[in-house]
Image (cartoon, rainbow, N blue to C red):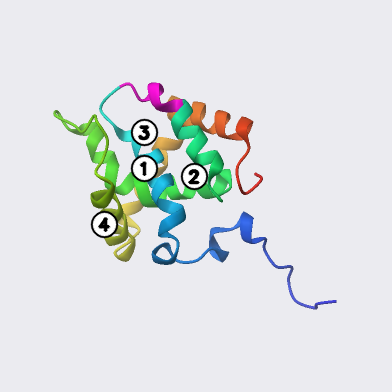
């Protein structure tokens, strides 16, 4: 019996996950699926695809939301404000490199407005479908 605090489950905490650079294989499909929320098109058309990718990932809903707000939103949200925004999908190499660069220079200022995406109708629909399908993390 341990005298210390209980250990957090690996599946329930981003704190116990490997650093982004050591988890790229798991994150790439998640980054690509979540980045589809920022395309300048009817993103509801990719709901089923996006939810299936996210449900198959090893991440819980809370972890997916953290990846969305802390990793994907900072590099893709500009697209929603662009007059001639990306509509076909972000280049996977650009997405990976941009997220990794952004992760190195996180600051409190860069966190402003990130959680706005969690209030979007498309994220609510995606989250509901992922919860229905179940996630690899069982959350």
Distance from disc 2 to disc 1, alpha carbons, whole Å, reads: 14 Å
Whether 124 is drawn above or below 2: the answer is: above
For the residue labelled by badge 2, is the local secondary structure a helix, a strand or a loop? helix
Looking at the picture, how far across and down is residue 34, in whole percent? 40, 40
N-term mark: 2 or 4: 2
Who is closer to the viewer here, 24 or 101?
24
**10 Å crowding of disc 4: few (<14), some (14-19), many (20+):** few
Q: Disc 1 marks which residue?
A: 32
Q: Is residue 31 left or right of residue 48?
A: left
Residues tagged 4 and 1 counted as in contact (Cβ below 8 A) = no
**10 Å crowding of disc 1: few (<14), some (14-19), many (20+):** many
Q: Nearer the viewer, mark 2 or mark 4?
A: 4
Looking at the picture, how far across and down is residue 114, in whole percent? 37, 44
N-term mark: 3 or 1: 1
Query: Residue drawn at (34%, 40%), measured in percent from left and top?
Result: 35
Query: Residue drawn at (28%, 47%), measured in percent from left and top?
Result: 92
Query: Residue drawn at (34%, 44%), measured in percent from left and top?
Result: 73
For the residue labelled by badge 1, is the local secondary structure a helix, a strand or a loop? helix
Who is closer to the viewer here, 16 or 108?
16
Whether 132 is drawn above or below 53: the answer is: above
**10 Å crowding of disc 2: few (<14), some (14-19), many (20+):** some
Range shown magenta? 42-47
Q: Nearer the viewer, mark 3 or mark 1?
A: 1
Q: Disc 3 marks which residue?
A: 37
For the residue labelled by badge 4, is the local secondary structure a helix, a strand or a loop? helix
Residues tagged 2 and 4 counted as in contact (Cβ below 8 A) = no
């Amino acid at each position: 019996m341990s005298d210390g605090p209980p250990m957090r489950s690996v599946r329930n905490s981003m704190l116990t996950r490997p650093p982004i650079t050591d988890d790229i294989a798991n994150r790439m499909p998640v980054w690509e699926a979540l980045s589809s929320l920022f395309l300048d098109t009817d993103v509801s058309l990719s709901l089923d695809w996006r939810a299936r990718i996210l449900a198959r990932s090893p991440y819980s809903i809370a972890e997916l939301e953290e990846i969305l707000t802390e990793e994907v939103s900072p590099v893709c949200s500009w697209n929603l404000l662009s007059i001639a925004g990306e509509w076909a999908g972000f280049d996977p190499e650009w997405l990976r490199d941009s997220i990794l660069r952004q992760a190195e220079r996180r600051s409190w200022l860069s966190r402003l407005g990130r959680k706005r995406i969690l209030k979007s109708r498309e994220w609510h629909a995606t989250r509901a479908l992922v919860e229905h399908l179940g996630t690899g993390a069982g959350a």
